[in-house]
Amino acid sequence: MSADHAPPPRSRAHSAMALPSFESATRSPQRAERTPSDHSRQRFVALSVILTGFDDAELWGTGMVDPYLGWLLSVVGDQFTGDLLSASQYAIDAAKGDEAKLEQLVRDNILADPTLGPIARNLIVLWYLGEWNQLPADWRDAHGASAMDQTCIISPDAYAQGLVWKAIHTHPTGAKMPGYASWSLPPYGVEGEP
Amino acid sequence: MTMPQGSYDAVIIGAGPVGLNIAKVLTDAGKRVLILEAGRASGLSYDGWLSYADTYRSALVKEPNSPYPPNPNAQSTYSQDILNIHKRVPILSGYQVERGPLAFGSTYLRSLGGTSLHWLGTCPRMVPNDFTLKTTYGVGVDWPITYDELQPYYCKAEWSLGVSANKDEQEHFGIWFPDDYDYPMERIPPSYSDRVYAKGAAKAKVRFGEREYGMSVASLAQARNSIPRAGYTLRGAMGAQHVGQRCEGNASCIPICPVQAKYSALRTLGELDRNFYTLVTQAVASRLIIDPNGRIGGVEFKRYASEGSSEYVTSTVTATLYIVAAHAVEGAKLLLASGAANSSDQVGRNLMDHPFFLTWALNPKPVGAFRGPGQTSEIPSFRDGPFRRDFAAFRIDLGNWGWDIATFPPNSNVLEAAGANVFGKTLRSQLGGEIPRQLRVGYVIEQLPEPGNRVTIGRDYIDPIGCYRPIIHYNVSDYTREAMVSANRVSTALFHAMGIDDDNIFTKFGPDSPGYMTYRTRDGETVPLSFFGSGHHMGTHRMGVSRTDSVTNRYSRSWDHENLYVVGCGGMPTTGSSNPTLTAVAMALMAADDMLTQLG
Amino acid sequence: MAITDIGDLHRHLQWALEVEHATIPPYLCALYSIPNGHNLEAATLMRSVVMEEMLHMTLVANVYNAVGGKPRICHSDFVKRYPTYLPHSSDAFEVQLLPLSPEALETFLLIERPAKPHARPEGDHYETLGQFYEAVEDGLKYLVSTLGEKAVFTGHASRQVQPGTWYYGGGGDVVAVHNLETALSALTEVTEQGEGIGGEIFDNDGRFNDVDELAHYFRFMELRMGRRYQATDTSGSGPTGNELPLDWNVILPMRPNPHSDDYRAHPTIHRQMVTFNRIYTRLLCQLEMAFTGTPSALRDAAPIMYELRYQAEALMHIPSPLGEGMTVGPAFEFDAGAKA
């Protein structure tokens, strides 16, 4: 096993103090608090491509890259976000374009990781449903919990941009209306009358 | 908003589709009307409506009342309140106190416009035999009116609500229309999945007793905008008439049509002549005052200043006629609290819903789940027939929203898959391969009037402004349970005829299912069943031919107080299998003619 | 006289379709650069104009069909590459695909600029839309007076899009055309909604609160000046009514005049642009079907318009690797591969 298969360096020296603090509980959880750097945006999109199965243009097209990365930075903090992005960058570099290998690396180094796994699974749900689920109790116990770590749809736009609706070839209910009689047309992947 | 002054020809309690349609008739005739509404005046501005739509989008649980902000002073039932009733354990936590033994899983909305803000808009007429259930099939009771007598009011109600349908597709089991009549708008186009069903239904057969029944798919009459027929003026969104001129396929009819292409009573409110009515919102009617001569002499109501505070002012208003149009549950509460109209002891009793029984399956090919209105077609084949001697009638709704409330897709699928570390292209294709094939059939089942199913009130259950909370006692009889077993047989026959094998039928009921219960069939087999509420509260102040066993006469006029009308779905003696709003509005329009006669 | 035979008339009506259509991509770019939920008043105003441009195409198609013509829409020639001069204009200004901006609005004002009174219609290279339509109206009247109404209005009634059926959601309605009177009334609707008549801001019925009661020129003037017109305003006074709030900071910074070829080196972006172009092409072909004998095909054009919108909105959000701080935007190119 070559050196580039070694797990990425990662700081474990985090505590609740490493998380951003919040002045007031009344601040709207709907708004992303942070403006991410271009570098982290690119790495965040690269990770999101792997987790969602949608390509970078599709993800940017939702307009949710910045809100979701901002959300992540606000809720789990710079440290864990950085660790997660480093882990995915490592997997991408190590896989050298081999998709099966990339998938295995993501399983082993991210999803199976007790710290990064819950965040990654939450990120999948966030992209697909616009919903953030409160991190598991043991995660919160181990790493401290942000006041923003609450189960919610993070904004009306997040709901409307949920990738699940694209995946199932329709539109979000109550948003992106498809027009009169659209329901009468053959669905995606089917031609002509039943 | 000013407080009401002076005397009125009529005071209407409740600004929903029933109350406001009566207000329309009375004000059109130049009568002065006061309308009391317990909920807020909101939804009238286009911006306000858009904010409701955004509330829906950001709601974690998209249940029927989710777009509409909670109001502690005029509470509504939320489906979360009742989803988890356990056997024989009363639920006291929600607004609606559930005494059981089964949960009454239906909600309504106390806000300007009433439950028409979140209804689906389905508008089938009742079939003639629904009005003569006792005479024809020996069960339930007869109505004091026949289909033929209600027929002209059905026509008026369909134009008032703005119903889209083709009449030649609605002539089920003796339903008839005048030759010169047609619905105000063309039918809503059937969904692709309706046509998948239709192909299978044409071959499906099921036997009950001596008789074999076939099935056919028909377009569903519904109060949402399509192409107008001559003489009908389309009505779009409040404050933005260009919006909502057609159903735009938002697929969120329940709980909110973002473009207001679906009828809500706000439209009718917008059409009232301002010179003839006064609307007072945040005004909860708390008591009808009965004069010594037996007439109603006033309405006492509590006006709260805001949702944020339980402070209120009590006032009384008088009028010639008093019209309770406050919903089957709220209206019964008001009558019970007032000791009014109840010499028959029928007020609050005979509470009925259409228990909603579901079956679900995966079609071999995509049907396009989650497209279009909640349902666009039905199978009317079991709305009437000799089987009604043995079990309840049902109307079969063909859902357009996948497995919908049966399993809550697509959220449940995403959460489950992500939890199992399914990700990336596998996740995307797994969801895309399955959910568009989801089929869900809903059975809107008749329920008979039973005195033990009832709304009561008690001093222990009071809301923040000192009004009673409803206490619900509810069960489902064997007549309806047997219909569920029959519905399941219909479902299997239908799915098989569509080419779906048993491995792709996913209908399953367990103790965690909403409305879970078991039933011992006539063959002695014990089967699990489950049902949802339809939100069709009926029967709590039924009309009848005799003052001894009904609350009102055929004109919804109280037997006990000649200037009191109790209108709405609560007046229905039996439920048939038709969603009740259209019938309730037709009954209200019939009542309104009687009111005009009284007023002279 | 610009139009002296039926051939001239057909040619002009085909041009009219091209002109009406050529305004739609720039208007849509302005509209879709407004992110969802922002600048609602401005978005409503822009959308109302686009809806009416669609109506104008339908009205022109009805006139064209009524005089025995055959609209051609589903064709690469029909689509211009931006920046472009308006088809058959005097080439006084170029039209670009831009996000909503003062610059874009200046162009829109030029497009919808009212005709100078007594400007003479010419055979081609029209200075204003009003002048162009005046030529069409003159030609229609001339042909009817020389050939007779029956010889001019030879089109089958079944080719007409009927009022109250497939057009909805915007101001005005379709006019079914079968004689000179209905043809003129259809064309009047086009010019009244466009640049207005004789410098009047409002129609006579005094419903000045409805967005669709203002000619497009004046609606764009409201956006440009950030103020609504009120009843006492004249075309000289400009708008002096309520403020029309417009937050320019939220406008999505689309790179001007997108072309899919520019993104060949960026396959994921290129794919999204091609997707858009195919939806756009399907829409044009669906419209041609509706305007060439199957009016009910308009029903299924509406879902394609929504598809177009959502794809455009996505492209408006994708950062462009070709311009710092800019996004990609829709190209509105004809894609022969999508022609079903």
Image (tube, helix red, strand yellow):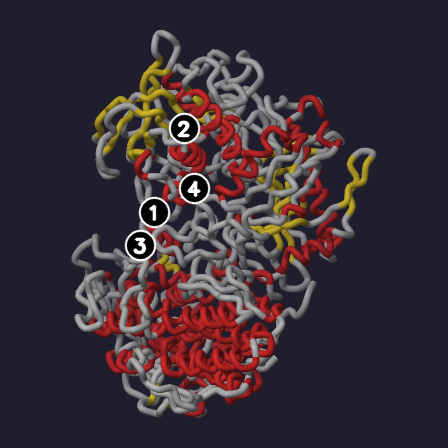
Local secondary structure at mark 4: helix
Dot 3 crowding, Cα within 10 Å, few <14, some 14–19, many 20+: some
Which residue matches tag 2? B330
Lower sequence index among marks 1 and 2: 1
The disc labelled 1 sits on which kind of residue? Gly
Lower sequence index among marks 2 and 3: 3
Compared to B207, does B225 lie above or below?
A: below
> Do circles 2 and 4 both sit on a common chain?
yes
Which residue is outermost to the front?
A: C146
Compared to C27, does B555 lie above or below?
A: above
Local secondary structure at mark 2: helix
Label of residue B47 in the image: 3
Which residue is outermost to the right?
A: B210
Label of residue B80 in the image: 4
Label of residue A113 in the image: none
Q: Chain of mark 1?
A: B
Residue at figure coordinates x 41%, y 28% from the top left:
B330
Lower sequence index among marks 4 and 1: 1
Residue B478 place in picture, x, y as percent = 65, 28
Lower sequence index among marks 2 and 4: 4
Residue B190 place in picture, x, y as percent = 61, 56
Numbered disc in front, either 3 or 4: 3
Label of residue B43 in the image: 1
Dot 1 crowding, Cα within 10 Å, few <14, some 14–19, many 20+: many
Give the CA separation, mark 3 to mark 4.
28 Å
Residue C48 place in picture, x, y as percent = 37, 67
Q: Chain of mark 2?
A: B
Task: Say if mark 2 contacts mark 4, CB within 8 Å.
Answer: no
Residue at figure coordinates x 49%, y 36% from the top left:
B105
Q: Nearer the viewer, residue C247 or B559?
A: B559
Give the CA separation, mark 2 to mark 4.
20 Å
In what quadrant of the picture does the N terminus of chain B appear? top left
